[in-house]
Amino acid sequence: MANIELPRKILVSRKALDETVNFCKELHLKGSCLVITGEHTKEVAGKRVFSDFQNNGFLSNIQIIKDESDIPELLEKINAFDFLIGVGGGKIIDITKYISNKANMPFISIPTSPSHDGFASPRASLNLNGFKSSFEAKPPLMIIADLDIISQAPARLIASGYGDVIAKLTSVADWKLSNIKTGEPYLSYAADLGLSAAQKILDDPEHIKSDIKFLVDSLINCGISMCFTKSSRPASGSEHMFSHALDMLYPEKKSLHGEQCGIGTIIMSYLHGQDYKKIRKCLEIIGCPTNAKQLEIPEEIMIKALVKAKEINPSRYTILNQIEINESKAKNILKTVKVI
Ligand SMILES: [Zn+2]
């Protein structure tokens, strides 16, 4: 297959950080690197990565960032470097990925939490115009997932990561549906990367919820699946559209991407005729919210988001193309699946 870009090194293990510099040498990376990290994640791993590179002959620098407002300054700065290293949670990695794509520069992804599949994907989810949208980017050259660090992430971020994997139960169902209804190409090997992980979680959540390596591997598989299609298609369907609608309608919310997608999966699995009760139970066991109250989002917003979801990406055919949903129908659906 032509022009598929994939990460060239992936390590998911305890003490994985110890290998970062060696891997760079193996890939013949040379010159100077900028470590991009956050106020908290610099203490967790950012400073350590910075000094490892400095002590091994790389001219390195470290930049602490907060959010998307730091992007213009970063873009001015990065020309002085040869590659970038993002050390942090979803936002830090997404920003690093976005600017590395703009500057056509390789980047290394070092996640400190497993809250969603963004640390391995070729898409960057950023709030650049007042609401969150997904931007094209390149996959990371390397992914270094140190389980000693990631397993210390707050339980809520870990549960959210499981929610983002569970979402593949409906994103793949939407993709299959589109293949049947519109003839859109469906790549089963890409779809199965995320779907088989989601299925395993669904079948044995009690056992899998404490297996951080399984979660991180699953999130990486979801990211890799998107490299094959160069779009978010395998990993993002109607449940993600519902989550993005929540982002737009209620920007002040505190809920996390994977939490919202988990609830989106309950709703869309019901519309697909899947066993939504089993999915809801699974999310409960994993520790993900399953209703509006737990998400701390008003019921009216949930109803409006379900009506609006279809408009989020009209070119992407999903189960929402098959059903006309007005506010009263949305309310009935959400009550049936006990989201409100
Ligand atoms: Zn996602």
Image (spheres, helix red, strand yellow):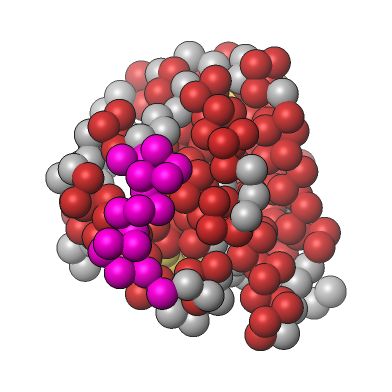
x, y (%) of residue 74? 29, 55
The span picked out in magenta is 324-340
Which one is nearer the viewer's eye here, 275 or 140? 275
User: At 46% from the left edge and 33% from the top edge, which residue is drawn?
Assistant: 160
Q: Quadrant of residue 143?
A: top right
Which one is nearer the viewer's eye here, 304 or 130? 304
Residue 243 in sight in this render: no
**Is residue 338 found left or right of 71 in the rendered image?**
right
Residue that protrudes farthest toward the bottom in the picture: 182
**Is residue 249 found left or right of 285 in the rendered image?**
left
x, y (%) of residue 304? 24, 60
x, y (%) of residue 34? 42, 44
**Is residue 253 found left or right of 200 in the rendered image?**
left
Q: Inspect the magenta stretch and tell me whether residue 83 lies in it.
A: no
Image quarter hosting the C terminus: top left
Q: Is residue 295 above or below residue 308?
A: above
User: At 54% from the left edge and 20% from the top edge, which residue is drawn?
Assistant: 285
Q: Is residue 322 above or below residue 250?
A: below
Q: Is residue 242 above or below residue 14?
A: below
Q: Inspect the magenta stretch and tell me whether residue 332 lies in it.
A: yes
User: At 73% from the left edge and 78% from the top edge, which residue is drawn?
Assistant: 180
Q: Quadrant of residue 165?
A: top right
Which one is nearer the viewer's eye here, 17 or 125? 125
Residue that protrudes farthest toward the left in the picture: 252
**Is residue 161 found left or right of 40 in the rendered image?**
right
x, y (%) of residue 56? 58, 29
Task: Tell me how many marks there are.
Answer: 0
